[in-house]
Amino acid sequence: MRKIKLSILFICSCLVTQIDTAARIKDITSMAGVRDNQLVGYGLVVGLDGTGDKTAQAPFTQQTFKNMLLQFGIKIPNAISFETKNVATVAISAKLIPFAKIGQRIDVTVASIGNATSLRGGELLMTPLRGADNQVYAMAQGSVVVSGFGAQGADGSKVTVNSTSSGRIPNGATVERTIDVPFAHNGIVTFELDEPDFSTAEKMAKVINANFNHSIAKAMDATSVTVNLNSFVPVAYQKINSTPQFKDSIDDDRNNINDGPDRLSAFIPYISKIENLLLDPEHIGARIIVNSRTGTIVMDENVMIDSVAVSHGNLSVVVSEKPFVSQPNALASGTTVAGTASDIKINQSQNRAFLLSTGTSLKDLVDEINRVGTAPGDLISILEAIKAAGALHADLQVI
């Protein structure tokens, strides 16, 4: 009985491990044609506590403010110049999500384009947001939320935490125009892998075909997998009691299929099923990501190194300046002279060389580097040198 229990537990643990390593298709792919659209606008933030634009350095702020007042019937002569310390010109950006409908609200980001020191407490006036085609798709307005904080003293000293010249307006824009998102073309839906890989694309097509018991999925390349849903949603169908009743025959003319709203809605149950299928993606090519600014290094577990010897030493030059005063004797004629003496020292640490054998794994590489005591900056140089020697079998990317 004990042996049977142990076997059952072992099988269950293996199943849990397999499920944990698998990912849903929706988590590693995106549908072709379904994407965000960028919006941008230019407007005014008012109600600032003297932290707005200084018109001497930002004359466009005064011009924009005059144009805004002119729309309300207030005309200020061009010869009159004034300070708008409580007003700031800003750029507004937002993302129009797929399938957004008129009246829905989206978040916007507001950033100063003048010399305003802070947007805290400001109110964005109504601003149209335009797309790449220069059409207005949303209207933005609301109170700006600034996460940063700044304080300045009378002597010019100041303390700033995060940025105070930009902020966000949650649900600050209302959608005024919709964008058609044709997620199906002639009854065919295309899924695009986030990480292109031929093996994963082929495996994904096999998983879809196995679950639907039809050859409806096909890997087109390392990124795209097409799914033909015409077998499940025929071209000619009618609705009875709001339930689609499909005919047995399918229109043979697939080149001029009109995917209207009713037919597109019939695809949704099948797309939902496909998105939630579990797939164990293949491992992508070995990569090493190096952030040269922060010294962060991320290495894939598949990184392998051929036999190579590495020796890395540190050379440091220290220059110190010591002040001195040369003063003549009491009865001598001369003047006292002040100067500095330079002391230059060169230090070179004698780091030991280490040998990496063929087939060295990521763990072996990290252990050897830690044993020698190499800093992250030196590790970047070592990896670049091993890659140049042709012994590093991984894609080395410096960001």
Image: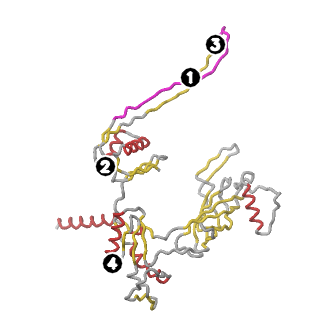
Front disc: 2 or 3: 2
Marks 3 and 1 in Cβ contact (< 8 Å): no
Answer with left or right where residue 343 lies relative to residue 134: left
**Residue type, label 3:** Pro
| Name of the residue lying farthest toward the top | 331
Instruction: Indicate the position of residue 161 as horizontal and vertical percent values.
Output: 59, 51
- Classify residue 17 by image quadrant: bottom left
**Residue type, label 2:** Ser
Q: Which residues are magenta?
A: 330-352
Marks 4 and 3 in Cβ contact (< 8 Å): no
Q: Residue at x 42, y 30 (%)?
A: 348
Mark positioned earlier in the residue sequence (3 or 1): 3
**Mark 1 and mark 2: span between their CA atoms?**
52 Å
- Classify residue 309 by image quadrant: top left
Q: Is residue 58 at least partly visible in the picture?
A: yes
**What residue is pinned by disc 3?**
328
**What residue is pinned by disc 2?**
361
Q: Would you call the spot at circle 2 few (<14 residues within 10 Å), some (14-19), or many (20 or more)?
A: some
Mark positioned earlier in the residue sequence (4 or 3): 4
Instruction: Indicate the position of residue 128 as horizontal and vertical percent values.
Output: 65, 68
**What residue is pinned by disc 4?**
214
